[in-house]
Image (spheres, grey):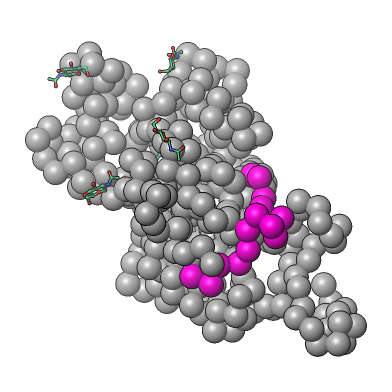
Amino acid sequence: MAASSCLLAVTGVALLAVVALCAGVGAAQLCEDYYDCTCPDAYDIVRRELIQAHKSDTRIFASLIRLHFHDCFVQGCDASLLLDSVPGMQSEKESPPNNNSARGFPVVDAVKAALEDACPGVVSCADLLALAAEISVELSGGPGWGVLLGRLDGKTSDFNGSLNLPAPTDNLTVLQDKFHKLKLNDVDLVALSGGHTFGRVQCQFVTDRLYNFSGTNRPDPTLDATYRAFLSRRCPPNGPQAALNNLDPTTPDTFDNHYYTNIEVNRGFLQSDQELKSSPLARGTTAPIVDRFATSQAAFFTSFAQSMIHMGNISPLTDPSRGGVRTNCRKAN
Ligand code: HEM
Ligand SMILES: *[C@@H]1O[C@H](CO)[C@@H](O)[C@H](O)[C@H]1NC(C)=O
Ligand SMILES: *[C@@H]1O[C@H](CO)[C@@H](O)[C@H](O)[C@H]1NC(C)=O
Ligand SMILES: *[C@@H]1O[C@H](CO)[C@@H](O)[C@H](O)[C@H]1NC(C)=O
Ligand SMILES: *[C@@H]1O[C@H](CO)[C@@H](O)[C@H](O)[C@H]1NC(C)=O
């Protein structure tokens, strides 16, 4: 929205509280310019806070995009993941896919505090996560995209719903089902899995592939032998299951297409990663997409940006009777 139309909006309502809206009032629709009038510096504030946080935590960019993913896949992108448990409502953040795994919550608090300082009660926690995801990718060398905004924050956290998040032991069929249910297709599945081009992963998620794949007492046959030897040294059978590894051993903190070049040589970390190429059902479905992204980083970047917008559009909460802008991301107002 142009500055002049902001002025018009303000004078037009005689300095009553300016409510941010997307064109098509009431429609469950997001837009890029949602905060242009009410918090024009929102993007820059988030970016500044993330750069600050990254100085003491190189992993934070990866951790933040994962929060957006785990938020959007459960009840839509409504910051349900950020609520703390209260009597009668256990938070998603304590569910097995998140407990001792999802991280970055104190940084979310710091970003929220900075946004509240500048524009009290305006920027939702769900939008904060969407902005943080884009900025994190861009600052790591990946593509940028116009983040769609205008989500409200919900009032509930869905512990049970988060039990259905994609799991590292899911086969291709199960992964496809979980994505298709949210109207995300195979290109979205393969592109978004490319989020594993940075960040860390605990030994517990590869132990079965190293020593006892699907109860066979043998390693996963689709795991490259040299990479398996490397991971076995880092994750010995009785070693600490929480020990950390790089999801992408080649460029651990860079957002590039090495996730796919790794998979091409059987060096996907998780079973769910390697399935995209090695499942017998991948032929003619996801495998050609992996091949395309391994060959062309530009093709990956274009698809990733589009798929992040698709993911950010899962069930947007825009009805003010069902949600609002939290002032503290951990608590429903
Ligand atoms: C396709 C299904 C997916 C599965 C099964 C999956 C599973 C996992 C697992 C098990 C971890 C390691 C957690 C830990 O060690 O504590 C992880 C980390 C991560 N995931 Fe996924 N994931 C999936 C999709 C995605 C998507 C769609 C994104 C983002 C677009 C994403 C981004 C990340 C990032 C960045 C990390 C590292 C986080 C950090 O270092 O804090 N993942 N994922
Ligand atoms: C989450 O992990 C902690 C250990 O850090 C454990 O004490 C707690 O029981 C776990 N919560 C759930 C709901 O499993
Ligand atoms: C979650 O699932 C458990 C076990 O199926 C059930 O007992 C509980 O009522 C569910 N909680 C909610 C809030 O739906
Ligand atoms: C995938 O996993 C599901 C659930 O465990 C199972 O029912 C199905 O048979 C598996 N599909 C293949 C092709 O292995
Ligand atoms: C391998 O996995 C199977 C099935 O989960 C289990 O019964 C067996 O005890 C495991 N073997 C070892 C050596 O842990």
Write down the region rendered in magenta: 314-328
Q: Position of residue 274 (x, y in %)?
A: 41, 28
**Which is the main secondary structure of the residues drawn in magenta?**
loop
- Name the residue located 64 percent from the left edge and 73 percent from the top edge: 122
* 325 is within the stretch colored magenta: yes
Q: Position of residue 160 (x, y in %)?
A: 43, 38
Q: Is residue 230 above or below residue 39?
A: above
Q: How many marks?
A: 0
Q: Quadrant of residue 290?
A: top right
- Name the residue located 31 percent from the left edge and 26 percent from the top edge: 223
Q: Nearer the viewer, residue 325 or 267?
A: 325
Residue 277 as seen in the image, left or right of residue 191: left
Quadrant the N terminus occupies:
bottom right
Q: Position of residue 198 (x, y in %)?
A: 41, 51
- Name the residue located 75 percent from the left edge and 81 percent from the top edge: 17
Q: Nearer the viewer, residue 50 or 159?
A: 159
- Name the residue located 52 percent from the left edge and 43 percent from the top edge: 74
Viewer can see residue 228: yes
Quadrant the C terminus occupies:
bottom right
Residue 113 as seen in the image, left or right of residue 98: right
Ligand 3's quadrant: top left
Q: Is residue 329 above or below residue 94?
A: below
Q: Quadrant of residue 44?
A: bottom right
